[in-house]
Image (cartoon, coloured by chain):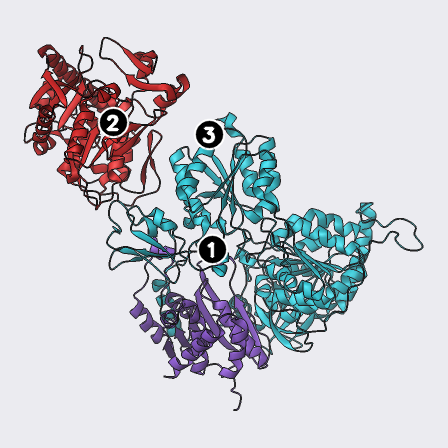
Amino acid sequence: MANIEIDAPGTSQLFIGNEAIARGALEAGIGFAAAYPGTPSSEILGSLAQIAKKMGIYAEWSINEKVAMEAAAGASYAGVRALAAMKQNGINVVSDFLANLVMSGTGKGGLVLVSCDDPSAISSSNEQDTRPIAKWLDIPLVEPGDFQEAKDMTKWLFDLAEELGTLCMLRSVTRIAHARGNVKLGELPGKQHKAYFDQIHDLKNVMPTKFMPMPSSLRHFFLHMKLDKARDKFELSPFNRYVGPDKPDLLIITCGSCWLYSQDAVKALDLEDKVGILKLGTLWPLPEKFINKHLGKSQKILFVEEIDPFLERSVMEIVANLPSLSPHPTFYGKRSGHINAYGELNPNMVIKAISTVLELTYQPRDVVYGNKAEAVAKSNVPERSMTFCAGCPHRATFWAIRNAIKLDGRDGVVTGDIGCYSMALGPAGFFQVRTMHCMGAGAGVANGLGKLGQFGFDQPVLAVVGDSTFYHATIPALINGIYNQSKFILVILDNSATAMTGFQPHPGTGMTAMGEPTKVISMEALCRSLGARVEVCDPFDLESTTATLLEMMAEGGGAKVAIMRRQCELVRAKKEKLPYKVHVDAEKCIGEACGCDRLCTRIFLCPGLIWDKKTGKSKVDEVICNGCGVCVDVCPQGAIIKEAT
Amino acid sequence: MTKKQLVKDPLNLVITGVGGQGNVMISLIIGNAFVRDGYFVTVGETYGASQRGGPVMSHMRISKETQYSPFIPDGCADIILGMEPVETLRMLGRYGNPGVTTIINPRPIYSIDVTGGHAEYPDLDKLVETVKELSAQTWIINATEEAQKMGSHMFANAILIGALIGSGVLPLDKKSVEPVLCEVFPKEIEANLAAFNKGIKFVRS
Amino acid sequence: MATESKGCKELFNEVIDAGLCTLCGACTGSCPYLVYYKGRIALLDNCTRMDEAQCYDYCPRTYIDMNAISQKIFGAQYGDSEIGNAEEVLIARSTDTSITEKAQYGGVVTTLLSLALDEGLIEGALLTKTSDDKAPSPFLAQAVDEILQCAGSSYMACPVLERYNQIPKDNGDKLGIVAMPCQVLAVAKMKANPPENRVNIGNVRLVIGLFCTWALSPHNFYQFLKENLDLSKVKRFDIPPPPANRFDVFTASSKTSFPLEKIRKFTMPTCAYCLDMTSEFADISVGSVEGIEGWNTVIIRTKIGAELMEMAKKKGKLQIDKLPSANLAHLKEASLLKKKRALNEIIKRSGDSNNLIYVGLSTKLTEKILE
């Protein structure tokens, strides 16, 4: 990650959106940052944690988003500027706290919530637009349109949040959060003032300071007043602007990443003097007066945003309340089907929408070339499905689980959760996982299945969960399983990292976000103290792990725990060299013949093993192989050889 | 020496490969070099889950005028740097055009779809010929092979950056790039610089 | 009945899921997809060899041309005798008390194997070993004391052939094998059509087959024993010949008996369809002697068998005597009765007297047996 504390105001740096947000928070004088890793938000806390010590601020990986948000609120109550960052699912996790926080108000330290959505769920279980929560719970909301704005908006938002005494939200998406762009730096802040939780509200009022949502209706009324104040400021905000001719043939109303896509599209179509773009940065409450000024500009209005028609509907509410716009424009967007109401957008889609609305044809490249290139790519380009990295302990774990379930013979069911191991829904993990929802849901669903014995259910139940997910959300479900005596095995995949999101530390790793050593919360000690049977296995020892799982499946009784402990390969590879040099003895390999049928490349599917069609044998790809040696135990002919390095 | 100009604005560069190959490193180095030379740079990347063996592409938009979006529109790539053959062809299919320059590292990485028997990996020689047919200019750089000779396939990234610079398609020279290279590759600076220079040589010879 | 190539899927359809599997182990151990576990054959993953898989070929419950096998092993027609090709039938017992103490009856199997090992005729023997808790498992014995450890019958099926299949394919050790009739049949199929990518079937130099009326389910029966006995104290099991009608369990100091009716429900269903009581395709077949305790009935079938028995006699390892003609007559009668019962069950199951499911017999021979 880039160094966001460079003291060089006025210079341009190449930051990803998340680094820009972090820098904005830094320039605003933030003191406290908390988050849980979640793509595409992780680098916000990550880059703050990297420079936290040096800059005298505090940054932590909280156990989950709820605690992160609550902790940040705590800091705000003691007068410290605080930020909580999360991906879209985190918003769901914190929603109950938010619903109460907006009523209770924040403290003297401005409190900002950053939500990073993942349109098309590129690295998520679901796609979800979190902006509606601002409307739902009355939270002032902004959305940056580029990398500079990501910084500037964050900085400004702290001032707003502090002035209003209410939580403010910034929403970003993958293509801002993880894309890189120019960011001109501002000044770094001065020293933090002392943190203190006021004892009395003010000199006039002798009531002790309290932060609570009651009386709710009255506070709701006050909240609306705060939002009215926010709206007034938004009417004058430089984050809202119009670019284009006075009387455009088409007016695009856009926000966020779509601001850049719209500009790209207009330029590609060479329509800069025909199409105007009304870019909004402050999305809730909407600056109605500002918007009204532009609504009459064109007969055609196209809304471009992702994912939901949030801005579109909010603007249409304004239109509904206007004395008739004359002549009344035609509105295009998600409602009309010109822009997808699902998935992420890109310039091509905006180009298509504009072309359709203005009845133009657009040919980005020579047609003959285009047809040839597309045809060639279609017929010659094989798919590239995701899989576990070579050397990943999850591959070995799911191999052992598969073997155990087949040997057990009672059609065992595996419920799944969120992480790299979610890939076990597919061929990478031998299709072992059957359910997947949100953090902690695997153990939750298993609890239900494990109590169905009285209905004739006799299938063994296993719930797989990652180590970080275990601490985040699964402990209550495990307690439920022990207390209600639900028959399932919680298989914790302990690879000593929150791997999927970038190897962040968690309570089991003994390291904090700021790189300080800390207490290790031993998962086996924790689970044993709950009264569960706990076994610790090394997934690379396939035979022993399979035997342990079989034995645990045959046993009766309530929830029990099997910990699969082996370090994530990518983490290990950074610190150590390859443990083994692995190669295939082509003489011993029988390939497709009866007795093997290409087990290693057809089913085991480690990308380190490839199939040489010419010789009809397997081969190790030395560029990909990480030398774990697990495949040696998989090959039925003993044709894979490992040599200790 | 007079600073070179962008041959068009924005200049669109696609870097493509497989998760784990080092796409991000290359775009970071080139991107930072350009920003320091006073350009607007936008880099769009796919990462997270897609890193686990899936295809990875970086879109770089370089401009003197303004910040562009992190997506190159279809058919508008000016340069394609392909770290893996099939991914190179995939990019040409979507973003190529008759004027594109392609640099390709012809070293296959087989997907599990291929090794699992569900898909065919195309004939490599034919693939390279097709790439040539679809590009105005093509350089074939055996970056992985040369990197392995130097001791590790990881040096392929620096070799390919060298090839990009040496080809002259970007208004960047060695002087702009070398300091950034040293910052981004803190380990093995010497070896990476040597690899970088090798890449330049390959293209110029 | 065609000899079309078939694969793993048909093996499950026709045999394993159809209740015909004998747990002989011929299909397991030679590929990573089929594994024996706790009394069943588990399929770990799908195999794509639907049209030609060795697991189907060597199963003793897929089509067998009985005459072809008989020609291959003996150069003789199948079905001429009720007890299969028998060069000589006699009784024998070991002269070594350390063997007879541990052995089932006369200790002939243990004696012959030990002799064969000592003389270098074999370098290993594939046997059934019962552990301290009496659970049977396949075992490759490579020393005389290891052979002795495997003496005594558990009466439970044991997939000995899995252990054979697991031997590395480039291993050249000469092997002996002690097997049930179904396993002997599987080995005979392998000899007739040598498997590929496995240890060479030619390594198997000596096949000792056991007499068998039925075998007990290794998982269910074992659970029953565990529930009713302290297995760590058990020394030996025995089903004495009729009219005894019981299953005996011996500890060092006592004997517990279960009525045979109680035990019968643990019989493997597939045994009802088996025509072979005396392991007709072995080199030597060994069983008990009705009415004469401490001796074995021995049927010598091949040259190898004859030579080994001769050597045992010459070296004074075995005491040999004639089998009384009444015993021989009874043996033939019992063997024929098993064939009759089996054929009747098969025809009942197939619903067609011309459909003998897996047995390749001429109509003439079928009728002859059934009359």
Residue at the bottom extreme of this rendering: B1
Q: Position of residue C62 (x, y in %)?
A: 21, 32
Is disc 2 in the same subunit as disc 3?
Answer: no
Which kind of residue does numbered mark 3 sit on?
Asp
Residue displayed at 26% across by 43% down: C50
Question: Dot 1 lies on which element?
Answer: helix
Tag nearer the camera, 2 or 1: 2
- Residue C353 visible in this rendered orientation of the protein: no
Tag nearer the camera, 3 or 1: 1
Chain with cyan colouring:
A
Q: Position of residue B130 (x, y in %)?
A: 33, 72
Tag nearer the camera, 2 or 3: 2
Which kind of residue does numbered mark 1 sit on?
Glu
Determine which residue is flagged by label 3: A458
Question: Dot 2 lies on which element?
Answer: helix
Q: Which mark is residue B112?
A: none
Q: Is B199 drawn above or below residue A432 in the view shown?
A: below
Left or right for A484, reference C358: right
Using the image as rendered, state which of residue A292 and residue C205 is in the foreground.
Answer: C205
The picture quadrant where one finds residue C238 is top left
The picture quadrant where one finds residue A46 is bottom right
Question: Dot 3 lies on which element?
Answer: loop
Determine which residue is flagged by label 2: C148
